[in-house]
Image (cartoon, helix red, strand yellow):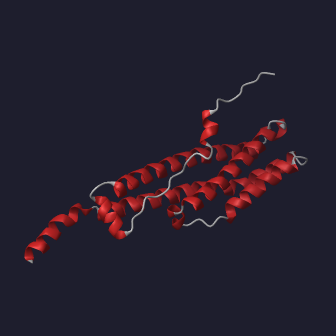
Amino acid sequence: MPWVSLLVILLLPGCGYNTLQQQDEQVKAAWAEVINQYQRRADLVPNLVEVVKGYAAHEKEVLAQVVEARAKVGSLQVSPKMLADPEALARFQAAQSELTSALSRLLAVVENYPQLKADALFRDLQAQLEGTENRITVARNRYIQAVQAYNVTVRSFPTNLTAKLFGFEPKPSFGVENERALSTPPKVSFE
């Protein structure tokens, strides 16, 4: 029997459990950063809407869409459990995409208001929003890389045996909502 104990002791470091734990924590940390950056963007939206309201009062529909999309994002229950639920992640992604789209429409409307574009507060908020969008992209990329490393470990032999034993499952990653739309070239018209 002492040889069984010796065998277990020799094989234990190679089982991958610590690697799985480390990579699982990296995924959680990367996810927390994604949420942090999305929250930063959501926090900027009310200020941006208020500044635009002062100049573009008759653009109520666009403003309402932004506020509604922001409310949807705010109503989602975000937790680490979402990382194991591809459907919850898809709902989160859809809500964030809707907010991105509404913000794009809002910024397009702003083009019709030169005084608004010249307003220092608006320019500051717009710069913060652009910076936050860049931070979101970086955070999402880090999350995708952390999930990729984790999923490779979970699926690789012999660590996959340890993963199955302890219930480590592959995690979903961010994806593209409509892959077909990406394969369609954009239409350019100078009319």
Check the image and name the residue furthest to the bottom.
Answer: 1
- Residue 33 in picture, x, y percent from top left: 52, 56
Residue 26 horizontal side relative to residue 133, left or right: left
Q: Quadrant of the N terminus?
A: bottom left
Q: Is 186 rendered above or below residue 178?
A: above
Observer-nearest of 95 and 131 = 95
- Residue 47 in picture, x, y percent from top left: 75, 54
Q: Quadrant of the C terminus?
A: top right
Would residue 120 be seen by someone viewing this image from the given angle?
no
Q: Is 54 rendered above or below residue 24?
A: above
Using the rendered view, name the quadrant where residue 178 is placed. top right
Residue 161 horizontal side relative to residue 103, left or right: left
Observer-nearest of 62 and 44 = 62
Using the rendered view, name the quadrant where residue 88 is placed. bottom right
Would residue 126 be seen by someone viewing this image from the given angle?
yes
Using the rendered view, name the quadrant where residue 86 is placed. bottom right
Residue shown at the point (44%, 54%) measured from the top left? 147
The number of discs equals: 0
Residue shown at the point (39%, 68%) measured from the top left? 167
Q: Is 10 rendered above or below residue 144?
A: below
Residue 76 horizontal side relative to residue 158, left or right: right
Observer-nearest of 45 and 175 = 175
- Residue 53 in picture, x, y percent from top left: 84, 50
- Residue 187 in picture, x, y percent from top left: 71, 27
Check the image and name the residue furthest to the top.
Answer: 190
Check the image and name the residue furthest to the right.
Answer: 58
Residue shown at the point (18%, 64%) measured from the top left? 11
